[in-house]
Structures are given as structure tokens and as C-alpha cells.
């Protein structure tokens, strides 16, 4: 049989011409209204906006050229937005004259902005139809442009029909602005847009079944347009060629759909129905051609070609049926209607025509409109508030009732999905993140390490003082009364007292550490539950009954779960209803209607507030359905509890909750004690390092004094006498021999003097002393040390504490470490030496018992010496998060 090679003619479509108008002076009329209603200043401020409106209206009065269709479209859109801003603010008194687009002899001239807006919308749809008709549909881009433009034209006519046409008709507009004409033009534009899709599917070689559906929808749109053209008030208004064109197009695409469908039937070897479909299509084409006078010749040619192909296919199908298939041809009334497939719709014009972002006349709002708007807003707010409270109350009732029935936790427990209360779960997660009970041992080890480090530092400091005191006692024994400086025990009493207090602090802290360790060990079984991961595994679960009489447990559980799902769906519906209320309020803008000042405000409010009646009814139905469902769930849950013995499960679960809570409380208590201990030891370490530095400086000062005093004793023995030129020190109780002119200065860089031998009254020579270990070298700093007191009235044995907020017991079990003052009891003024081998003209008075640091520089001070060493054991930067190494075997560790 013949194949579907026919393609409908692509150039037979219709476009709508614009309505024509006459000139009108909007500027003067609107300016007078603003000046009289508002003020002359407002009128002056609106001059630019008024002139823009007048310029756009004057431009619309000129005919449009085909080359400027896009600019004409933009002009119409801008002018329509301006009219939307003018309508709620001003009263129009000027008359607008517009001629009918299909009968130019008819016109209307009325002072109505609705007529003006309707005419602009009509012309906007007409311009879009002209843009579509001007597109080259032989190309893909042109076909797309034509299809989109026809759909936008349909959207313009649809917007005219739904929003403006009724008001314009009531004001006396012509027939072309009536809702019926706008609806007919909308159907016509959709038919032509669908026809563009038909051309595309044919060009793309789509299956005949799809082509049949697309063609059928084209015919349906044309049939709807023809029905409106045949009715009132359009039956006598349009030219007969328009009516004949639309009618023939409807028949053509009906026949096209039948032809494409018959091709599909032939491929399926359904010859009998193919013959019937072809006969129906040929009859429809023949009947339409008889009454289609005045139709364009290309359209008639395309219909004739379609008719010829269908006749040829009918002959072939008839012969095949007579010779091969011998099938009975069904009558037309037994056949089903051909389906259509709509691929087009009117484009939305809301965004294109939205004037909310325009600033024209924004400063002019009548007071009455604003007050009325406030009243309406209060009505809307009251409605929304009442409904929102109902929704929230329903949700709260659901939450409480489910909590009372222990749902859905009991269902989840039966399925193995056990859950903890949210606050308890958060507490457990916090404990596990911090290390849990298993991590307490490492923190206890930190306590031990920090305590050991503090003990070692304390022992080192005590040994430093003890060594200096031993050396002083040896010299005192050797020289007797010539060794006149104060004893070390007198000067170090304050330091020794502090060290003793630190030792007591460490001993008391050790006792607290022991109590903490015992608490960890004693409560380890209780706290072990916190190491379970996930923690829910430590809780009991609901077990199925061991013996079942009727085996309906699954049915009971299934029914309860289904009811819970329904309840959840109702909750989701309530959330959606609340969002709908808020969205309705956001979009509810009646200001343009109020500013128009048409009718009673109360009537307008009643009409507008009725928009919320439907959603209020839905809320009431939702709440009622929830109440019924909760009663049903209560009955089902009672049965579920009886079968699965929920009471015993609840008791066991509460016991598990309490055990977890007790474990968390005990863990936090121990954790807090450990943290307090770590903080204590770190603070104590700083304090011990501070006093260790003071002791180091004290020992260094005593060593310097020791060297000077040894030199003086040696001078006395050698016959030197400085008594005539040097005042006697308060602490110098021995005679000073005269200086020997040949005596040289001692070595400035000597780090530790050798102790002199005891005096021999029978000989002028000094006996040698047993050798003693040389102390480590000490070097004076090159400047004042800010860590030591420079107050000359400072008493080294005072119990001065610079911290007024000192608290000896920061927490139970620990004592705050004794705070050591960053001061030293040794000061002495500095007198620089006059030369390496010369005696000073005025020898200084060596007051060996006075403070010598900071700021003190003795006669053997060397400013080029290196900075003072911080002692043989510098303070390590311990902190609470570090694991300290075990003590060295050679360290000065002395347990308290």
C-alpha cells in the first residue's frame, strides 16, 4: 500500500491585526488630577513619569512595521505596566477611542482604563501572532520561534479573557474585546502552535501513531475555535473566509489523524478498521470542501492531496481485504474516538505583565487605601493566627498521646531499633567522645607523671639549698670568727618554709589521687556500660511471646504500624496546610483594588477573606480525622501491649535508663576530679619552677659573696689592711689587713673558689683544705631581673603573698600550691671595678649578709659574661595532655 509521504502545507496560518486608536492627552489630565488630589509638589515630582506615559501612548498610535515587531512588543508591555500603576491611583476622565480589529467601521470611545488595558492586551497577542507568522518554519529555530510565539499569543488572549475582557465589555468595548472573542483567539493560537509541533514530528519521521495523536489535537483546537466562531456574538462578526479557514483546518487535521492512524493499522494488519477509518476521513474532507468558499488556494490543494492519498490507500486496503483477509468492516459508530496529545499550552503572562518592580508613581498612595489595607491585613492575620493555633494544638495532642502510649518506641524496640531519650543519648555521646571510662586510665597516668615531675623538681631545689648550706658550714668551720656572713639557715628560712608547704601540698594531692584511683576501680563495673557501642545494645528489647495461641501477633503489629503511618500523613498534611496559609497571606495583595475605590470596602473584604474558607475547612477535617485515628491507635496499642507484655519491658527499660544516668554522673564526677588534679599539678609545677629559680639565684649570689670573702680573708692573712679607707660593715666582725701594693686582682672568670685552709697561728702560711666538688658555673645576668624584688626594705623571712585571692583549698582533696613571690632577699648596689690590677681609690664595703640580686654588681662583676643559666634542671613545658616519661634512675626523686 502507499506509504505516508504526504506533509501538510506549512504556510497556511492566520495572524491577528492590531486594533487602531486615536490620540489622547493623558499628561494634562493626569497632572491636573494629581495636583488637585495630592499636591502641586507631587505633580511636579511625577512630571517625568507622566511624560513617559504620554510618549508611550503617542508611539502606540502609529502603525507598526514588520521589521519592528519586537520593539512594538516591548512598548506594549511597558505601557500595560504603566496602566496597571495608574489604575489604583488615579481616576481617568479622558476618553479612549479604539476601532474593532475585525470590523474597522465599529469603534468605542469611553473614559475607562479597563478598555485601554483590554485593547493593549489584544494588540500584544496580535503582535505575538505576527512574530510567529513571520518566522521561517522551514528551519528548526524558526519553527521553535513560531511555536513559542503562538503560545505566548494564546497566553495574552487568555489573560485578556480572564482578567480584563469582562470589565471592558461592561464599559462598552467592541466585540473583539469580549471574553468570547478572546477565548476563540486563544484556541486558534493554540491550534497553530500545535500545528508547528505536527510539522516537527512529521519532519523528524516519528511513528504514525504519534503523528496521529498530534494531528488529532490540532483538529480539536480548530474545532473549539470554530464552535466559538459559530456562536454568539461572533457568528456575524467575522469575515466568512475566517470561518471557512478554521472549519477546513479542523476537517483537514481530523482527516490527517485518520490517515496516520490507518497507516498504523495497516502495519498491524487490522485491515477492516483501516478501511472504516479511511472512509470516515474521506467523508469529512468531502463535506467540508463543499462549504469552504473563499479559502486560500494552497490550503485547498493540501486538502486535495491528502484526499487523493487516502483514496489510494482505501483502494489498496479494500482489495487486500477482499482477496486475503475477508474481514468485516465495522460501522463508524462502533469505532472509538481517536485520542489527541496536546503539546502546547498558553504561556503565563503574570511575570511579563508584573508591574510590582516598577517605580513609576511610587510616591502616590491614597490615605484611605492604606487605612483600609491595614484593616484587611488585621482580618487576615487573625484568621491565620487562629488556624495556626489549631494546627499546633493538634500536633501537640498527637505528641502527648503517642508519648503516653510509648509509640512508636515500642514498635521500634520490637524490630530491634531501640532508641534512647535524646538528652540521655547526647550525654552518652559526649562521654564517648571524651574517651569514656576506658580513657580514664591514661588520665590517671598523667596525674602520676605530673606528681613525679613536681616531686623531682622539689627535691632538686632542696638539694641545691642543702649543698650551699653545707659549703657555708665548711667555710665557717675552717675560718671561725673570720667567716662573718650570716648563716644559710637564717637566710633560707622563708624559702625552706615554702618548699615544706609544697611538699605538704604534694603529699595531700597524692592522697587525693589515691582516692580517685580507688573510685575508678570501684565504679568500673557501673561505668563499663558507657563503653558499649552503640549504647542502645545495653538496653532490653521487646521479645515475641514464646507461645502463641492464635498466631496473630504479626497482624496486630501490622495494623498498628499502618495506623501510625496514617497519623504521620495527617501531620505532614497539617504542615502543608500551615505553609499554604503563609503563602496565601504573602500573595494576598488587595492594594490595587483598594486604591481603585470601586464599591464598598466591607464587601471587598468579605469577598477577599473568603479565599481562606477552603483551607480552613481542610484544617478542620484534618483535626477531626486525627481524633478518630488516635482513638483507633489507642485500641490497637492496648491489644499490642497485652500480647507482648509491655509493662515488664517498660520496667526493664527504665532500669536501664537509670543505670546509664548513674554511670554518666559517676563518670563526670571522676572526670572533674581528674581535671582538677591535672590543673593543680600544672599550677604547682609553675610555682616550684619559680622558687627553684629564686633558690638558684640565691646560691649564685652566695657563691659570689663567698669568693669575695675568701679574697678578703686571704688579704688579712697576707698583711693587707683596709681599715683606714673602708668603713666597717654591719656584718663584718673581723679585722681587715692593709692592702699589699703588689697583690693582684683575683681571676674575674673564676667560677668557684677553693675553700681556704684553717688559720695556723704558728705559721704565716695557709694550710690546704680537702678538695671539694666544684659547684656548677654561675653567670650574672647583664641587666636587672624582673622576677626579683628590688625593694631595699624587703624582708627575706616575710610571708609575703602577692595573690590576694589565694585559696588554699581549690577543691576537696587538693590544696592550691603555695604561691612563691617573684622576689629575692638579696640586693646590693653595684660599684664597677677601676681596673684589672688596681685597687679602687675608695674600696667598697662588702656587706656579705645583704641582698645582692637583682641590680647588684660586686667588685668582680664582669658585664661581658653570658646570661645566667637556669640551673641544671630547666623546667620542662609539661601540660595536662602529655604523657610524661618515667623518672630517670639518676634523678633526685625523694618520695614524700
Image (cartoon, helix red, strand yellow):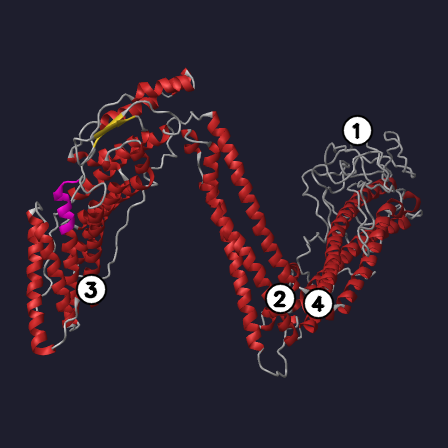
| The magenta segment | 238-248
Labels 4 and 2 touching (C-beta < 8 A): no
Mark 2 and mark 3 lie on one chain; the one further toward the N terminus is 3
Q: Reading the chain from its start, which is encountered first: label 1 or label 2?
A: 2
| Residue depicted at x 47% and y 41% | 586
Place of residue 215 in the rendered image (x, y in percent of width and height, measured from the top left): 19, 57
Q: Residue at x 48, y 25 (%)?
A: 367
Q: State how far apart marks 3 and 4 are (Cα).
A: 68 Å
Magenta residues, dominant SS class: helix
Residue 330 x/y as whole percent: 17, 70
Q: Residue at x 77, y 33 (%)?
A: 830
Q: Residue at x 80, y 45 (%)?
A: 820
**Residue highlighted by disc 3:** 209
> Where residue 425 sits in the image (x, y, percent)?
64, 62
Where on the picture, by quarter, is residue 709? top right
Residue under pointer 1: 841
Mark 2 element type: helix
| Residue occupied by mark 2 | 634
CA–CA distance in space, label 2 to label 3: 56 Å
Q: Point out the frontmost of discs 1 and 4.
A: 4
For disc 2, the neighbor class at 10 Å (few under 14, some 14 to 19, many from 20) is some
User: Which secondary structure lies at badge 4?
Assistant: helix
Mark 3 or 4, nearer chain start: 3
How many residues crowd around disc 3 within 10 Å: few (fewer than 14), some, or many (20 or more)?
A: some
Disc 1 packing (10 Å; few <14; some 14–19; many ≥20): few
Q: Nearer the viewer, residue 778 or 230?
A: 230
Amino acid at each position: 500500500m502507499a506509504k505516508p509521504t504526504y506533509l501538510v502545507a506549512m504556510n497556511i496560518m492566520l495572524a491577528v491585526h492590531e486594533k487602531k486608536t486615536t490620540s489622547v492627552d493623558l499628561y494634562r489630565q493626569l497632572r491636573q488630577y494629581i495636583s488637585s488630589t495630592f499636591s502641586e509638589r507631587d505633580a511636579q515630582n511625577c512630571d517625568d513619569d507622566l511624560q513617559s506615559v504620554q510618549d508611550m501612548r503617542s508611539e502606540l498610535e502609529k502603525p507598526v512595521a514588520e521589521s519592528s515587531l519586537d520593539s512594538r512588543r516591548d512598548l506594549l508591555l511597558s505601557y500595560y505596566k504603566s496602566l496597571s500603576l495608574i489604575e489604583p491611583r488615579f481616576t481617568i476622565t479622558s476618553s479612549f477611542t479604539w476601532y474593532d480589529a475585525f470590523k474597522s467601521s465599529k469603534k468605542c470611545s469611553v473614559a475607562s482604563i479597563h478598555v485601554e488595558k483590554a485593547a493593549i492586551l489584544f494588540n500584544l497577542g496580535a503582535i505575538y501572532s505576527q512574530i510567529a507568522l513571520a518566522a521561517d518554519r522551514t528551519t528548526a529555530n524558526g519553527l521553535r520561534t513560531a511555536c513559542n510565539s503562538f503560545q505566548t499569543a494564546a497566553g495574552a488572549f487568555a489573560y485578556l479573557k480572564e482578567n480584563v475582557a469582562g470589565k471592558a465589555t461592561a464599559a462598552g468595548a467592541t466585540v473583539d474585546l469580549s471574553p468570547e472573542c478572546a477565548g476563540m483567539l486563544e484556541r486558534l493560537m493554540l491550534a497553530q502552535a500545535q500545528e508547528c509541533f505536527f510539522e516537527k514530528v512529521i519532519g523528524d519521521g516519528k511513528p504514525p501513531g504519534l503523528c496521529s495523536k498530534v494531528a488529532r489535537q490540532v483538529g480539536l483546537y480548530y474545532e473549539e475555535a470554530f464552535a466559538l466562531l459559530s456562536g454568539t456574538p461572533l457568528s456575524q462578526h467575522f469575515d466568512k473566509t475566517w470561518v471557512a479557514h478554521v472549519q477546513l483546518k479542523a476537517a483537514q487535521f481530523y482527516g490527517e489523524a485518520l490517515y496516520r492512524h490507518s497507516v498504523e493499522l495497516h502495519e498491524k494488519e487490522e485491515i477492516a478498521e483501516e478501511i472504516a477509518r479511511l472512509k470516515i476521513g474521506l467523508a469529512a474532507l468531502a463535506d467540508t470542501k463543499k462549504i469552504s468558499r473563499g479559502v486560500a488556494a494552497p490550503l485547498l490543494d493540501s486538502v486535495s492531496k491528502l484526499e487523493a492519498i487516502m483514496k489510494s490507500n482505501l483502494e489498496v486496503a479494500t482489495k487486500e481485504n477482499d482477496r486475503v483477509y475477508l474481514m468485516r468492516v465495522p460501522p463508524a459508530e462502533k469505532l472509538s474516538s481517536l485520542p489527541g496529545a496536546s503539546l502546547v499550552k498558553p504561556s503565563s503572562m503574570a511575570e511579563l505583565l508584573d508591574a510590582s518592580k516598577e517605580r513609576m508613581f511610587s510616591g502616590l498612595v491614597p490615605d484611605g487605601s492604606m487605612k483600609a489595607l491595614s484593616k484587611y491585613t488585621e482580618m487576615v492575620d487573625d484568621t491565620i493566627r487562629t488556624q495556626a493555633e489549631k494546627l499546633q494544638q493538634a500536633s501537640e495532642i498527637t505528641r502527648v498521646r503517642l508519648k503516653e502510649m510509648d509509640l512508636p518506641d515500642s514498635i521500634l524496640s520490637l524490630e530491634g531499633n531501640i532508641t534512647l531519650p535524646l538528652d540521655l543519648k547526647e550525654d552518652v555521646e559526649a562521654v564517648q567522645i571524651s574517651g569514656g571510662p576506658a580513657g580514664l586510665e591514661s588520665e590517671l597516668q598523667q596525674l602520676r607523671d605530673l606528681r613525679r615531675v613536681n616531686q623531682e623538681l622539689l627535691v632538686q631545689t632542696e638539694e641545691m639549698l642543702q649543698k650551699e648550706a653545707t659549703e657555708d658550714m665548711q667555710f665557717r668551720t675552717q675560718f671561725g670568727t673570720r667567716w662573718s656572713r650570716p648563716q644559710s639557715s637564717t637566710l633560707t628560712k622563708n624559702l625552706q618554709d615554702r618548699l615544706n608547704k609544697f611538699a605538704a601540698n604534694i603529699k595531700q594531692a597524692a592522697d587525693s589521687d589515691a582516692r580517685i584511683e580507688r573510685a575508678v576501680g570501684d565504679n568500673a563495673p557501673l561505668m563499663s556500660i558507657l563503653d558499649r557501642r552503640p549504647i542502645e545494645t545495653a538496653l532490653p528489647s521487646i521479645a515475641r511471646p514464646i507461645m502463641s495461641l492464635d498466631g496473630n501477633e504479626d497482624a496486630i503489629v501490622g495494623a498498628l504500624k499502618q495506623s501510625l503511618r496514617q497519623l504521620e500523613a495527617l501531620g505532614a498534611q497539617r504542615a502543608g496546610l500551615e505553609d499554604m496559609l503563609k503563602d496565601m497571606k504573602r500573595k494576598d495583595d488587595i492594594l490595587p483594588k483598594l486604591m481603585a475605590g470601586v464599591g464598598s470596602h466591607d464587601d471587598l473584604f468579605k469577598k477577599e477573606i473568603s479565599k481562606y474558607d477552603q483551607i480552613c475547612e481542610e484544617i478542620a477535617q484534618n483535626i477531626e480525622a486525627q481524633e478518630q485515628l488516635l482513638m483507633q491507635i489507642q485500641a490497637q496499642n492496648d491489644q499490642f501491649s497485652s500480647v507482648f507484655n509491655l509493662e515488664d519491658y517498660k520496667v526493664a527499660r527504665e532500669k536501664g535508663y537509670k543505670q546509664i544516668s548513674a554511670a554518666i554522673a559517676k563518670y563526670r564526677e571522676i572526670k572533674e576530679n581528674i581535671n582538677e588534679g591535672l590543673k593543680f599539678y600544672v599550677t604547682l609545677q609553675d610555682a616550684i619552677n619559680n622558687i627553684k629559680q629564686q633558690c638558684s639565684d640565691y646560691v649564685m649570689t652566695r657563691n659570689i659573696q663567698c669568693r669575695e670573702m675568701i679574697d678578703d680573708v686571704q688579704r688579712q692573712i697576707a698583711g693587707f689592711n683596709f681599715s683606714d679607707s673602708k668603713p666597717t660593715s654591719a656584718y663584718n666582725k673581723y679585722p681587715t689587713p692593709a692592702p699589699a701594693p703588689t697583690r693582684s686582682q683575683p681571676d674575674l672568670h673564676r667560677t668557684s673558689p677553693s675553700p681556704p685552709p684553717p688559720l695556723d697561728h704558728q705559721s704565716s702560711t695557709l694550710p690546704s683544705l680537702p678538695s671539694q666538688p666544684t659547684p656548677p658555673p654561675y653567670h650574672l645576668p647583664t641587666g636587672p631581673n624582673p622576677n626579683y624584688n628590688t625593694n631595699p626594705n624587703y624582708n627575706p623571712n616575710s610571708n609575703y603573698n602577692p595573690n590576694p585571692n589565694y585559696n588554699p583549698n581549690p577543691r576537696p582533696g587538693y590544696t592550691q600550691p603555695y604561691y612563691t613571690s617573684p622576689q629575692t632577699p638579696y640586693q646590693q648596689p653595684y660599684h664597677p671595678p677601676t681596673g684589672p690590677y688596681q685597687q679602687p681609690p675608695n674600696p667598697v664595703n662588702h656587706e656579705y649578709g645583704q641582698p645582692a640580686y637583682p641590680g647588684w654588681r660586686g667588685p668582680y662583676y664582669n658585664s661581658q659574661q653570658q646570661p645566667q643559666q637556669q640551673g641544671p634542671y630547666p623546667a620542662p613545658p609539661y601540660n595536662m595532655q602529655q604523657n610524661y616519661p618515667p623518672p630517670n634512675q639518676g634523678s633526685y626523686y625523694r618520695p614524700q
